[in-house]
Structures are given as structure tokens and as C-alpha cells.
Amino acid sequence: MKIKSVEVVRIQRPDADPATTGSGTTLSASTGARPKTQGYRKAWPTQIEVANPMSKFPRFKQRRQLYSAKKWPSFAVKVTAEDGTWGLGTASGRPAAMVVEDAFAHILEGETCMAIEKLWDMMFRVSKSFGTVGIASVAMSAVDLALWDLAGKLQNKPVYELLGGPTCDRLFVYATGDDVDWYRELGFRAFKLPCQYGPVDGLWGLRENERRIAEVREMIGEGCDLMLDCYMAFDVEYTTRLAERLRCYDLRWMEECLIPEDVGGHLELKKRLPWMPLASGEHFYTPYPYQLMIENRCLDILQPDIQWVGGMTACVKICHMAAVAGLEVCLHGGGRDAYGQHLSWAMPNISWCEYYIGSDPGVPLEEVAQPGALVPRDSHLKFAPTGPGFDLGIEEEWLVPFQA
Ligand SMILES: [Mg+2]
């Protein structure tokens, strides 16, 4: 069976809020579904400062929304086979949509639908001349996920079965965000906080970071895991100082302390903090940086994002590389979408999933869930068999021209 067409489309759900559809400001944009329930307070992303790589610029320091892309619409890639069967992979950002339309679609049309490794290799190689990492890697991911969805539909099997089948009945899920009281109400038993302050906040910021960690540790007790997400905001020296201050709070890991390009910094950090588990990877693109990190034992937990790193095909390679090195993979945001859930069911070295919560406290998770994704209960995702592909539950009539 050959590929008939590769198209960029927009998902126009019948229940979508026209004000939000397709206007996500981050790479993991919303699907536009409007929650029915009103929250009892605003969620943390617009309420607290979070340390980030732009924190050194006072004009943008207070909120990430001050510098986020003005226009970064959600889109989907629809790959259609000769018999009319189609698969869908979602992404966001006009530049990635253009890479699919202008650089990938014409080389993939006419190729064999099931030859996913070859198709991934073609996209990887054709992108060499304009750059594979970042935007092109997001574009590759969307096409790759559409191909896996299509492969499942053509064989009448869910994607986790194409990957070998489920490895467990349920997966442990942790909550990411700063509304810890709400996550506890929802039954979560592990929590990852965004770190609020960084190097430019000096000693005061170090104390404030410690104060918040101490407060949350007190709230959740000693039996629950606690992690700290540092979103590329630090350098080696600051990370070392903060980690030493936080040693007594028994963090499960510190995450993304450095920018991904700083390989030397990652090496140095592991030397300085052999006792602190270090996690990273959501802004690494393609399996190559993972190979470097694994070989040099810089990281303890690898966190690829299935919608950014190169799709399912790249994630499977990373999981296999990590498995032979005895390392765990924990997908970035992977507990929230069907793509990450299917992979996580099927890989023996994924035992935890991340569930990012940016919706207002009080809004049930079911009302803001991604298409085809299960919602956690009691800090677990309970495995449930699904239909073919990723079983996203998206109708063909909802797919309209992208019109960037
Ligand atoms: Mg993170």
C-alpha cells in the first residue's frame, strides 16, 4: 500500500472554542476543547514566576507569556493511503507546518506506507541541508506519528501492539505544576515543581527556592516523591549551589538544569553532583544527543518529547539505547497524550509518566484531556485496550485546511 497524500490540516472540533482553536502559544498547544467546569482559581502558569533561559532579561523575566511566540497555531499532518485509510499526527507552529508541506510531503508521496524506518530516514536526510533539529524535528515527529497511526489502522491493531504489546497493567504518573493542593485532591502521589528563581535572583532566589521546596515537602510528607524542573535556567555553579541546599529534601531528580547544547556542563554537573539524580531531554532533538548523554553517563533519566524529538520512531530508538545502558526513559509530557501513552505501555524501561497540568484547579482532567488519551486516577494510568492506530477519536469531517 502506497502513500497517496501528505497534508497539513487543522482540527476543527464541533465543540471547540473559536477563540482558542489553533492558537496555542507553546509547542504542546491545546486542542481547543472548552472545559465545562469553571475552576476555583487561576492555574500556576499565569500566576507565578518560573526561571527560564530568558530570565536574565528584566523585560521578560516575570512571565514566560511575555516572550512566547505571537502565533504558534496547532496543526495536524494527515497521511492518506491509496485505499483512503488515513493517519494523524499533531504538532504546532507555522514553520513546522511549512517544513511538512514544502520539504517532506512530495518525497513521501508514492512511498510504501509501512516502511516507516525508511520514511524517517528520508526525512532525516533531506533535512540535512536546512537543519534537522528543532523545527524540522517537530515536523518529522508529526509525520512519523501520522504514519504509525496509519500503520495501526491498516493492520487493524493499536500502536502499542505494533510495538510488541503492553508491558504492564498500569503506569505510575506524576503531576507537573505548582498547584500541588489540587494535584493531591486528584490523587497524585508524586509532584514536580517548576523552579521559580535562578542565577539572576542571587542568594534571595536560592532561599526562596529552598523555602518552596521545604513547604511542599512538608505538605506531601516523606512518602511522596518530589522533583524540581529547572527549565534550562541555570549554569553549573548555580545548579551545584541549589542542589546542595536541597539535599535534605530528598528530591527524586533535578530536571533540565542546563541548556541542551552545554555538553561540557552536563559532564561537569554529574561529576559535581554524583548523589543527585539528573534528568533532561525534552529539548534534545533526534536520538543523537541521547547517545552522547548515555555514553558519558551524564543523565539518570531520559526525557524525550515524542512530538518534538522525531516521533515514535526516534523514541523507540532512544528507549532501546537507554535499555542496554540500564537507564530509564520517562517521556516529557508523555502521560497526557495517546502517542506517549501507547509508547509507555510498550517499553519495559518506561515505568513513570509525566502529567502536566496547566488547567485551572477545580476543572476535572477529563474536560481538558487530549484526544484518545486516558486520564490518570490515584496517580496511575490504568491500561485499557484501544482501537486501531492511536484511536484518537477524531472524525475526518473535523479536518479542515490549515490556512496558516
Ligand atoms: Mg521539564
Image (spheres, rainbow, N blue to C red):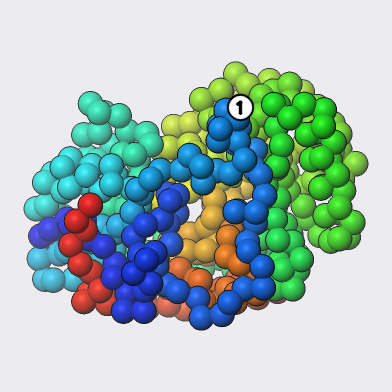
Q: Is residue 193 left or right of residue 81?
A: right
Tally of numbered tags: 1
Q: Which residue is denoted by mark 1 in the rendering? A: 56
Query: Splitting the image into four quadrants, where does ligand 1 fall?
Result: top right
Where is residue 281 shown, x and y percent of the image?
54, 39
Task: Tell me the residue at 55%/35% (across/down).
Answer: 60
Q: Is residue 115 visible?
A: no
The quadrant where residue 266 appears: top right
In this rendered view, identify the residue nearer to me: 293 or 191.
191
Q: Is residue 165 left or right of residue 126?
A: right
Amino acid on which the number 1 mark rests in the picture: Lys
**Furthest-front residue in this view:** 59
In this rendered view, identify the residue nearer to me: 50 or 261.
50
Task: Tell me the residue at 51%/46% (across/down).
Answer: 65
Q: Is residue 376 left or right of residue 347?
A: right
Task: Tell me the residue at 70%/32% (across/down).
Answer: 198
Tell me if residue 279 comes above or below residue 166 in the rendering.
Answer: above
Dot 1 alpha-carbon crowd within 10 angstroms: few under 14, some 14 to 19, many 20 or more: some
Where is residue 82 shown, x and y percent of the image?
10, 66
Task: Tell me the residue at 10%/60% (across/down).
Answer: 4
Tell me if residue 352 comes above or below residue 120 in the rendering.
Answer: below
What SS does tag 1 mark?
Answer: loop
Quarter holding the N terminus is bottom left
In this rendered view, identify the residue nearer to me: 385 or 47.
47
The quadrant where residue 178 appears: bottom right
In this rendered view, identify the residue nearer to me: 11 or 173.
11
Where is residue 389 shown, x and y percent of the image?
34, 69
The quadrant where residue 83 appears: bottom left
Where is residue 303 shown, x and y percent of the image?
56, 45
